[in-house]
Amino acid sequence: MNPHAIEIRGLVKKYPQFILGPLDLTVPRGAIYGLIGPNGAGKTTALDMIFGLGRNDAGTIRLLGLDHRRDEVALKRRAAYVSPDLNFQVWGKVGKAIRFVRGFYPGWDDAYCAELMRAFHLSDRDKIATLSFGAKTKLSLLLALARRPEVLILDEPTTGLDAISKQEVFDELLKAVEDGERTVLISSHGLSDLERFADHIGMIKNGQLRLEGRTDEIVDRYRLVEFFTGNGTTWHPPGPAGLTILKGNENRWHALLDQHSGAQEWLEQHGAQQIALTRLTLEDLFVALATENDEAVI
């Protein structure tokens, strides 16, 4: 069995003012994988490409070993996509929407659907037009999860949800992958949520994959470092990859330090003083990576 649920290799999608890629991204089978990045980084474009919503200019996308274009029908039977753009209002009521979607999927799980209805506080009789934005999101998730897809792809599924509703959604996602056979790829700006629930993280910036790996390993790898240089002079020496200056004021510097790079030892050897390391949250790391000047690595 292929250990990867999704494999993207050399993906390129060109627009007049933006290029996604070349992008390589790997989602392990059975994982909850959080895809993060600034607005406009290419996250939604990448998710759309997986489901054939737009034609890639180069590269390959495989989901459960299936080619995203050649095997499109088989892929969509085994995977589900939830996007804020989905709108089920045309069916009028929740029950009618469920019955319509249910007819397309022989593997639909009625008992699980009923369980999700209770968990998400939805009723057959609810009018979709009068549901809150958060309740409509829950309906979209229900219609995807009740199919028992092997891969579930979610684009900003917690937008508009309060803290309790977010907890309900993530509880169901954890249940969905507990057998190790199902995979969730989720794009979200809820970084504190992803740090708790996602076991893998990938970050896209300017159409490129900036980092990827296990969430705990990535968070543990980086530190915010503060240090001082002598004589009160500005300091711009050449240095190793892995040390990214975030800001400096005379002889005081703040930087992002990759502990795998040997940059701390380099600082010590080059006269940096009062070196202090601070552990980062995933949100701290995201802000540092998202706002860094790509040419500021010393």
Image (tube, rainbow, N blue to C red):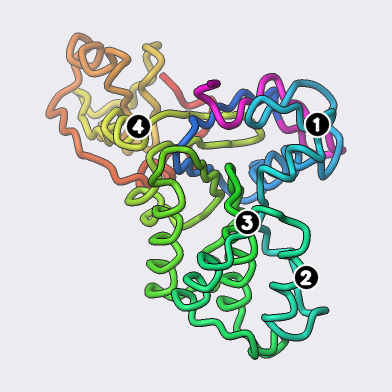
- The magenta region covers 1-20
Judged from the image, the secondary structure of the residue bearing numbered disc 3 is: loop
> What residue does disc 1 label?
71
Proximity of marks 4 and 2: CB atoms separated by less than 8 Å: no
Which residue position is annotated with label 2?
A: 100
Density class for disc 3 (Cα within 10 Å; few <14, some 14-19, many ≥20) is many
The label shown at residue 218 is: 4
Q: Residues within 10 Å of mark 1 (few under 14, many from 20)?
A: few
Whether the residues at callouts 3 and 2 have beta carbons within 8 Å, the answer is no
What separation in Å lies between label 1 and label 4 (alpha carbons)? 34 Å
Quarter of the image where the C terminus is located:
top left
Residues 131 and 91: in front is 91
Residue 259: image location, x then y, percent: 27, 22
Residue type at tag 2: Phe
Mark 2 to mark 1: distance in Å?
A: 24 Å
Q: Is residue 285 above or below residue 210?
A: below
In the image, residue 213 lies at what x, y percent?
42, 29
